[in-house]
Image (cartoon, rainbow, N blue to C red):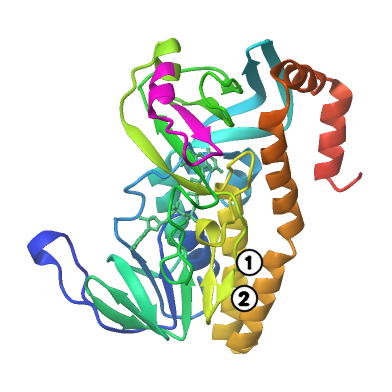
Amino acid sequence: MPTRRTSRGADRTRLSGDCDVLVCGGSFAGLAVARELAGSGARVLVLDRYEIGERQTSACGIPTEWLRTMGLMGAHRQTFGRLVVHTPFGTSVLELPWTFSTFDYPALCELLWAQSEAEFETAKVDGRTADTVHTDRGDLSAPLIVDALGWRRVLGGGGYQPPDAPLSRGLEVHPWGAGDEMELWIDRKYVPAGYGWSFPAEDEVRVGVGSFDPHFHVKDTTVMLAEELDRDPVRYQGNWIPHRLRAATDDGVFFVGDSAGHCLPLTAEGIRTALYFGIACGRELRAVVEGRRPAAAALSRYGDFSEGHRWKFEAMLAAQRIVPRVPPGLLHRSIRAMQAKRFVRYCKNVEAGRE
Ligand SMILES: Cc1cc2nc3c(=O)[nH]c(=O)nc-3n(C[C@H](O)[C@H](O)[C@H](O)COP(=O)(O)OP(=O)(O)OC[C@H]3O[C@@H](n4cnc5c(N)ncnc54)[C@H](O)[C@@H]3O)c2cc1C
């Protein structure tokens, strides 16, 4: 097990050795895997090129219940019971079947990390040969390897090359300020296929634009939306967002979160899915390190589990393709119809498994 901790620059030391589980990527997916292995007795090492929580990767909006159930309310910023949707034809206010909350990214990562018993090192992961992972600080080996490195899927084959890959493009600014509503803009003046958003988070507002078409550049319209809202276009944050499910296992490696395309098409929600599949992966790994299951069986079970959700991802991808083609007037009327109490009740029942 590597024992030397590092910092930056000249103080960086070489890493070498092995551990039971090597989790590459220390954001939502990687931390959820590590958390699930706490108490298993396994030697778990998490690698990330940045310190935990250092680089925010999203607008950090999630159903509140996920924060509550996972003991993460300490990172909570603001809760919304409704969603305000703007189209060129008017504004609709949709009561949500469950509340959404924004959270603080560094605080959430710290809370997840505190629930794990793993070790952490900063290192840039460059690739893999069999059970050895190559990093800019040396090679590390483990019988169980997890790629939670995001859309680049560094440890797998068939890498994506934007913009010619099934990736959406997201960019946001984080001006200081406050707001009461979680808002979306479905308006072609900001993006031909996609949406704009404003997510208040107590003392800052996350304003951005996401495009389902990776060729459409969202910087100008992100600035436009921010300025129209009287917000300063400052503190940028953006990334590619996968909208296609990929194999969750390959050549002995477990892929979780964006590296497996576990981000929902249409809504571009990838946090709760990263946590969800991270927990599933962690449970399989736990069964292996506790001697209850061979690694091959865990790989196959986790791969099947992810595949079992494919139809939902495909259905949402179909919706992602259809929605931008709906004439804006008709889209507005459809969204307005969702304001009906009956529709909200139906969604609640679906969520509760009663429909
Ligand atoms: C602008 C924007 C807003 C979004 N808003 C939301 C939202 O409000 N709600 C929501 O549910 N989803 C949102 N998403 C999607 C969500 O951010 C992702 O789906 C989610 O972050 C996926 O989590 P992950 O852990 O799989 O990957 P990531 O969060 O991308 O984490 C990957 C980790 O791997 C590390 N890493 C990458 N490459 C290397 C390497 N070579 N070596 C070492 N470390 C490496 C990174 O530093 C990072 O810590 C948004 C995305 C964008 C771009």
State if disc 2 and disc 1 touch (CB < 8 Å).
Answer: yes
* The quarter of the displayed image where residue 25 is located: bottom left
Ligand 1 within 8 Å, label 1 CB = no
Quadrant in the picture for residue 4:
bottom left
Location of mark 2 (residue)? 284
138 relative to 313, above or below = below
Whether residue 261 sits left or right of residue 10 in the image: it is: right
Numbered range of the magenta stretch: 207-224
Q: Position of residue 144 (x, y in %)?
A: 48, 81
Q: Which residue is mark 1?
A: 280
Location of residue 115 with respect to 350 vertically, above or below:
below
Decide whether residue 219 is among the magenta residues: yes
Q: CA distance from mark 1 to mark 2?
A: 7 Å
Residue at x-position 34% and y-position 46%: 55
Q: Nearer the viewer, residue 153 or 137?
A: 153
User: Residue 209 location in percent, x, y?
Assistant: 48, 29
Pick the quarter of the image with the N terminus: bottom left
Secondary structure at badge 1 equals: helix
Which x, y percent locates residue 24?
40, 68
Mark 1, other Cα within 10 Å: few <14 / some 14–19 / many ≥20: many
Instruction: From the viewer's side, name the closer residue of 305 and 169.
Output: 169
Q: Residue at x 82, y 36 (%)?
A: 347
Could you say whether the residue bearing mark 2 is in a helix, strand or loop?
A: helix
Q: Does residue 176 lie above or below 165 as drawn?
A: above
Instruction: Name the residue type under label 2.
Output: Glu
Q: Name which residue lies at 63% across and 12% down.
A: 88
Q: Looking at this view, is 339 or 223 the one in front?
A: 223
Q: Residues within 10 Å of mark 2 (few under 14, many from 20)?
A: many
